[in-house]
Image (tube, rainbow, N blue to C red):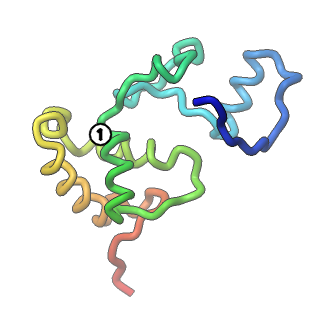
Amino acid sequence: MKDVLVTVISDLSALAKDAFLFVLDNRGWMHPFDENGRRRDYSAIPKTIGELVDDPYRSMAGELRRLGGYAKDTTPFSEFIWADFLRRRIDHNAVSKNFDKAMKEALALAKSKDADYLPGWCGPTSD
């Protein structure tokens, strides 16, 4: 990419690197978790986009939103929260062997009461 559009929400340029990362983390502006949902040290954060590792559950969460499984939400990293929800309920082998079948399971899970605490949940209610 030659150009990227951004919106500056806070100028933290005066902070030392460790303070900068601490502030990002505490404001929920970073997601220091790996493709297995494990929290990592700040030093393990990839330095370039090319170093990022694919998280199949993040791909599922993106597809789930596209299919109407949940609504777009302003919660930072909401798709990662959904990915973690799916990671805890759908076996990794099921995802890698049959993504479409795993997506059907994900859609059912997204509409369940188990997911009602997640950002953008739009399952059925009893009112």
How far across and down, in percent of the image, does residue 54 sit? 36, 28
For badge 1, the amino acid type reads Arg
How far across and down, in percent of the image, does residue 102 sit? 17, 48
At horizontal 25% and vertical 59% (from top left) the residue drawn is: 107
At horizontal 78% and vertical 41% (from top left) the residue drawn is: 8
The residue singled out by tag 1 in the image is 87
Left or right: residue 38 compared with residue 29: left
How far across and down, in percent of the image, does residue 76 sit? 58, 47
Rate crowding at label 1 as few (under 14), some (14 to 19) or many (20 or more) other CA atoms within 10 Å.
many
Q: Image quadrant of residue 87?
A: top left
Q: Is residue 120 above or below residue 23?
A: below
Quadrant of the snapshot with the C terminus: bottom left
Q: Is residue 112 above or below residue 97?
A: below
Left or right: residue 9 compared with residue 79: right
Q: Image quadrant of residue 69?
A: bottom left
Left or right: residue 125 compared with residue 43: left
Quadrant of the snapshot with the N terminus: top right
Q: Nearer the viewer, residue 55 or 48?
A: 48
Q: Is residue 61 above or below residue 19?
A: below
At horizontal 14% and vertical 33% (from top left) the residue drawn is: 93
Left or right: residue 32 compared with residue 14: left
Q: Image quadrant of residue 4?
A: top right
- Would you say residue 5 is visible in this rendering? yes
How far across and down, in percent of the image, does residue 51 sit? 46, 17
Provide the secondary structure element on which disc 1 rests: helix
